[in-house]
Amino acid sequence: MMISRLIMILMCAGLFACEDASETLQQRPNIVFMVVEDLSPRIGAFGDTLAVTPNLDRLASEGIRYRNVFATAGVCAPARAALITGMYQQSIGAQHMRTSSFGRTRGGDLGTFSTEGPPYETVPPPYVKAFPELLRAAGYFTINDVKTDYQFGQPFTVWDVHEAGAALRDRDEGSPFFAMYSNNTTHESGLFRAGWANKLENSAALVERNTGRLAVLDTYTDPADVTVPGFLPDTLEVRKELAQHYDNVQLMDRWVGERLAELEMEGLLDNTIVVWTTDHGDGLPRAKRSLYDSGLHVPMIIRFPDGRGAGSIVDDLISFVDFAPTFLNLAKASVPDHLHGRDFLDDGIPSRTYIRDARDRIDELPDRRRAVRDHRFKYIRNYVEDRPFFGALYYRENLASMAEMRRLREERNLPESISQYFETPRPAEELYDLSKDPDEIVNLASDPRYENDLMRLRAELERWTTEIGDMSEQAEVDMVTTQMWPGGVQPETGEPIIAADCSADDAVVTLSSPTVGASIGYRIAGETPNHWHLYSGTFHAQQSQSIEARAIRYGYRESEISRKELCQLAVPYSGSH
């Protein structure tokens, strides 16, 4: 799949003012970004001696280990919205997990739970763009295999190639590339086991999948060898679940090895920056979906092809909102002023003082929590105090560890340090000394010895909330039906307008959309049918050519397709998408 020579010439003439395209490619690195799911730093290179991770350990020995990276939410869709946009999810209306489950009802032996409102896609402010789209505008070829989950749909303008099995062979060899790969082997659902997972219509299928995947391993983790965190009970079934988690980590590491082998086979490892991380912490109760480090703290490795920093460790605080400006700067692309993150590779920018996080509705259970963390202390504000932390989420109820906690609580054998998560009211504020209490069990908010730290972090939370704007200050149904989808109906992007100046030998083509903030894609007759170029400015075409264009505002429905025979009167187009 190739971008035309005409487009490359236009890039050099208009966007980059470069004299030679090949010189530009040498100056602008290829980037591979691997994101696996639901995994805390359970990696050998990060000090976990139980983890079998030879491929990641090799990557770490050739790269830089970042030990203080944090998702903006302890659950995938809001965290991915922040990652892909460089903006905190609650500032763009993407904070609820997930938008498509709004209004869903689930029932079972723990009761029936639902939310009131229409399923929707987030409509961010019109200036918000996914950073891969900004990379495309700067001349990068973008590849995604295959997960998106950004809360605002799957705009066709973000990726050149977006499909299961997308690979480096699909790239345009005339452009630098950005490839994002996802892997769900370590996902929470990978912990579902026979006899425990029976709360969802597809639970049995997930158990069967897990059994098949794990059958390829030669060695398995002994439950007796795992360390049970302080927020889970130490029972045999919990140990078995943690052991299976480590087995999934071993499978995921094999996948990483396959991606590295692909780079080597294509001859790209020596001119590609490789970044590996996870979308949030472990898929365990009191980890995933929480604002504790067990749900937010993730490992990250960056390997540079020139070997810089090989084997080194960085302890700076890094947030998911920092990925967008960092990748854009690596690509020598413009970084929008509205981004909330910072380029963590720029030594000229002061390192972070604080990490900031949010939790809102989780599936069918409404909530609102906010957190601020520095290198030592974590502050959490609970805006909803009358709901227990462990409400009945039927997805999570498939875990043996969740069933074990409920059993022990009924038997009155669950330690108070864990049973507190089932009780109400929740404290309005929480404060933890992470240096002494890494599992965040002992709440110090009422301890006068820590009053100064409590006040400092409370003030920072209030300052941050004012600075970015928090769309959870209104009910979700009001946010959706008054601001995003009026009356609960998805808006449609206006059909793009194609204009051509035919006064010279070539037609000069301009595209526009009546919808503010819409992104526009176009294709020229005779090119690859399913590939749409991203419109980023006026371009040249032959006067006799035919142009098709369509547009998408994030969260809206796509527009109809416009078609124009250049340097002739526009003709109606009634074809399909």
Image (cartoon, rainbow, N blue to C red):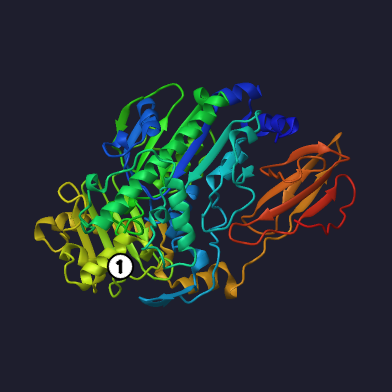
**Residue at 23 percent of width and 74 percent of height:** 425
Can residue 341 be seen here? The reply is no
**Residue at 35 percent of width and 48 percent of height:** 245
Is residue 86 placed above or below 400 in the rendered structure? above
* Residue type for callout 1: Phe
Q: Residue lying at the far left in this picture: please name it.
A: 449
Query: Within the image, what quadrant is residue 546 found in?
Result: top right
In this rendering, position of residue 345 left or right of residue 477? left
Is residue 218 placed above or below 437 in the rendered structure? above
Location of the N terminus (image quadrant): top right
Q: Nearer the viewer, residue 180 or 29?
A: 180
Is residue 547 placed above or below 404 in the rendered structure? above
Secondary structure under badge 1? loop
Query: Within the image, what quadrant is residue 143 found in?
Result: top right
Q: Residues within 10 Å of mark 1 (few under 14, many from 20)?
A: some
Can residue 488 be seen here? The reply is yes
Q: Position of residue 105 (x, y in %)?
A: 47, 75
Residue to which mark 1 is pinned: 390
Q: Position of residue 361 (x, y in %)?
A: 41, 67
Q: Position of residue 533 (x, y in %)?
A: 70, 42
Q: Position of residue 191 (x, y in %)?
A: 38, 54
**Residue at 83 percent of width and 59 percent of height:** 574
Location of the C terminus (image quadrant): bottom right
Q: Nearer the viewer, residue 405 or 307?
A: 405
Q: Nearer the viewer, residue 512 or 123?
A: 123
